[in-house]
Image (spheres, grey):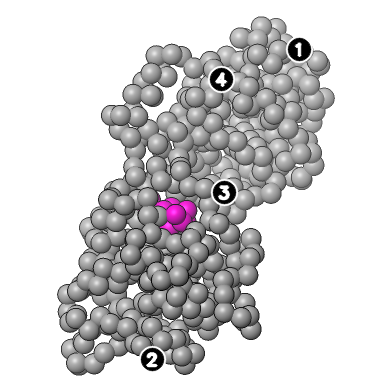
Amino acid sequence: MRVYIPPRAFNPVYLPLLREDSHRYVVLYGGAGSGKSVFAAQRLVVRLLERPLCNVLAARAVAATHRDSTFALFRQVINRWGLGSLFRFAQGELRITCLNGNSVIFKGLDDPEKLKSVTFPKGELTDVWVEEASELTEAQFNQLDLRLRGRGSHKQLTVTFNPVSTVHWLKARFFDRREEQAAVIKTTYRDNRFLDPDYGRTLESYRESDPYYYQVYCLGEWGVLGQSVFHAQKVSARLGGLTGPLYRGDFLPGEEPGGPGKREDGFVSVYREPEPGESYVVGGDTAGEGSDYFVGQVVNRRTGEQVCTLRGRMDEDQYARQMYCLGRWYNWALLAVEANFSGYPLRELERLGYPNQYVRGRGEAGRLGLGFLTTASTRPVILAGLVEVVREHTEWLHDRETLREMLSFVRSSRGRAEAQAGAHDDCVMALAIAYYVRGAGEAPGESQWAVSITR
C-alpha cells in the first residue's frame, strides 16, 4: 500500500533514517522536546503502510503508560496525516490494525508472560519499538531482541530515550562499545521545527536558571544520578567542548626512546607532547580490588594541564613497562604509582632503573616507601584537591574518559565519595594522585619526605 507522505511532514534531521533498513537497531536519543518519539511513530506508520508483512511490538517498562504515550502518538500521526480510514483502533486491547493486515500491539515489561502470547493475524513480528528504553534492564531488552528471531533486513528494533546516567547499560552497549549494527542519531529541541514556541522558551530558560539541568535534560548530555562530588555542570560543559587526543598509541618493547607507536585502539592518549625543559608528574592507579584498568595520568607540573593518559587492561609487568616509557618520554617525569594492592609495578620500575619514583613519607615504623599509599587519611585530601582543580581549572582537563568518570563519582548515602555501582574510578584516582604530588602537599600522617629518587 503506497501512500504519499510529503517530506515536510518530518523533521529534516530524521529524514535519512526514514527508510533505513541496513541496521539491526535504530537508536534515537537526546534532549526533551526533540521529536524523537514522534518520528519513531511516524517511521513505523510508513513501514506499516509500505511493507507487505510488517508487525510492530511497542514496548515500555509498564504497560499502563502506553495509552497516553505510544498508542496516543500512533493515533495522532495517523489522524494528522488524514489516514484514519486506513486503520482500525482497538483501544480496549491496545491494538492498531492497518487495512493491509499489518498491525501494532502495545505491551509492558511488567508482565513478561504476556509477551509470550504476542501473535499477529498476518505474519510474524518484524519490528520492535522500545520507548523510554532507559527504564528497562538490559536483560529485558535482550528478551525483546530475541523476539525478532533473526537478523534479516526486515527485522529491526527502534530505541528512544533521554540519556540520564553515565553508567547505564544503554551507554555501554551502544556508545562505549559502538555497536556496529546500530544507526544512531542524537537530537535536541533545536532540531524540532514543530516544537511549540512556549515549550521551546521554557527549555531555553534553563540555560541560565539551571545550567546542569539544561545540559542533561535539554541538550541530552549523559548525566549522573545522585550527588556528584565534582562540579557536574562544568564537567558536562567541558565534555561538550572536547575534540579528542592528538593521537593514540602504545609504547612497544625494543623501540628506541620516544613517543608511543600510533595505534587507534592503543592504551595511550596524547593531548600534548612533551616539551623540552618542562617538568611532569604521573599519577598511577593499579587494577586493584573493584577496578578493571591500569591508569597513568600525566600532568604538566608548571601549567597543571593534563597532557596524556594511559588506560587499559594489561598485566602488571606490561603496566610497569608502559609507565616506564611514559615517564621517560615526558622528560623522566616523577612517577607516583599507587602502592595499595601490589608492589610489583613499583619493584619492576625500580628493577628497570627508573630514576624518579615518588617516595612517601615516614610511616609509623619510620621507614620510607615507594609509591603513593591511599589511606583513610590521604584519600579525602587528594580528592579535595582534584575537586578544586575541576571547579577552578576545568580547561586543564582533556580526557573524555576521565571526565565521564567524574560524572559518575558521587557521594554515597554514607557520605563517602566513590564511583557509582558499575562505574570506574581509576582515572579519577590516578589524576587525584598526580595533582597532589604536583602540589607537593603534605598529607596527614606524612612528613616532608615526599621526594623523588634520583640516581
Identity, as a three-letter code, of the amino acid under mark 1: Tyr
Q: Nearer the viewer's eye, disc 1 or disc 4?
A: 1
The stretch drawn in magenta includes residue 402: yes
The quadrant where residue 439 appears: bottom left
Helix or strand or loop: what does disc 2 sit on? loop
Depth order, front residue of 5/301? 301
Instruction: Identify residue for label 4.
Output: 73
Q: Dividing the image into 4 quarters, which one contains the N terminus?
A: top right
- Magenta span of residues: 398-408
CA separation in Å, label 4 and label 2: 72 Å
Magenta stretch: helix, strand or loop mostly:
helix
Depth order, front residue of 189/101? 189
Q: Earlier in the sequence, mark 2 or mark 1?
A: 1
Indicate the position of residue 251 as horizontal and vertical percent values: 58, 74
Instruction: Identify residue for label 2.
Output: 455
The answer to whether the residues at label 1 and label 3 have Cβ atoms under 8 Å apart is no
Q: Is residue 429 left or right of residue 135?
A: left
The answer to whether the residues at label 4 and label 3 have Cβ atoms under 8 Å apart is no
Indicate the position of residue 278 as horizontal and vertical percent values: 40, 69
Identity, as a three-letter code, of the amino acid under mark 3: Phe
Q: Earlier in the sequence, mark 1 or mark 3?
A: 1
Instruction: Identify residue for label 1.
Output: 4
CA separation in Å, label 1 and label 3: 35 Å
CA separation in Å, label 2 and label 3: 46 Å
